[in-house]
Image (tube, rainbow, N blue to C red):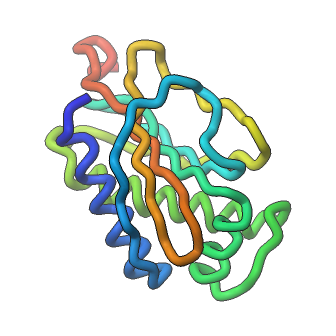
Amino acid sequence: MNAAYIKPFIQGIRSVFGTMVNLEVAIGTPTIKSEPLSTYDVSGVIGISGEVVGSIVLSFPAETAQQIVARFSGEECDVTSPDFADAVGELVNMVSGAGKADLPHKGASISCPSVVVGKNHRIATGHETPCVVVPCKTECGQFVIEIALKEATVGAAAA
């Protein structure tokens, strides 16, 4: 995968979490994901279409997600609350929007976020789309951003 597809989302994580959650994020070494199982229990998912296609996932342990959501929203939320899912969705939306703005391909759109809660859920990407997992560490705990993007084929970009 092109490194130019990863760096904007790392910057998006740092910017959004620094500004909106008041958290400094330490970035670990990216790796290629080989399994479609989620890394953690709570995942916010955004699809990307246009000149580049794929998905961005923020995946958190439930406890870390609860702490981050509490800091973000100003109130504690149980993972079963619709407000919890809304907050996780908004975080992945802001990170994805910030990253998309700095992609080398400007013709990309992001979808509405989806949030999945539960152990061992699967997030499938196309078999030809590599997924890079970037570990992130904060004082609230660890989480990852999973970046699965590739350049669209000519026919797919036109559609």
Relative to the observer, which residue lies in front, 112 or 38? Answer: 38
At x 79% / y 63%, what residue is drawn? 79
**Residue most extreme to the bottom:** 74
Q: Position of residue 123 (x, y in %)?
A: 61, 31
Q: Residue at x 58, y 68 (%)?
A: 141
Picture residue at 21% right of the left edge, 46% below the top:
103
Q: Nearer the viewer, residue 14 or 138?
A: 138
114 up-or-down from 72: above or below: above
| Figure disc tally | 0
User: The N terminus is located in which quarter?
Assistant: top left
- Residue at (33, 62) in percent of width and height: 12
Is residue 23 toward the left or the right of residue 28 in the image?
right
Q: Is residue 85 left or right of residue 149?
A: right
Quick one: which residue is furthest to the front in this view?
A: 29
Residue 60 versus residue 123 in the image, above or below: below
Q: Position of residue 41 (x, y in %)?
A: 71, 49
Most foreground residue, 137 or 12: 137
Above or below 5: residue 16? below
Q: Residue furthest left?
A: 104
Quadrant of the rendered image containing residue 36: top right
Residue closest to the eye, 124 or 53: 124
* Quadrant containing the C terminus in the rendered view: top left
Residue 55 at what x, y percent from top left? 45, 37
Q: Is residue 76 left or right of residue 9?
A: right
x and y percentages locating residue 157 in the rendered image:
28, 22
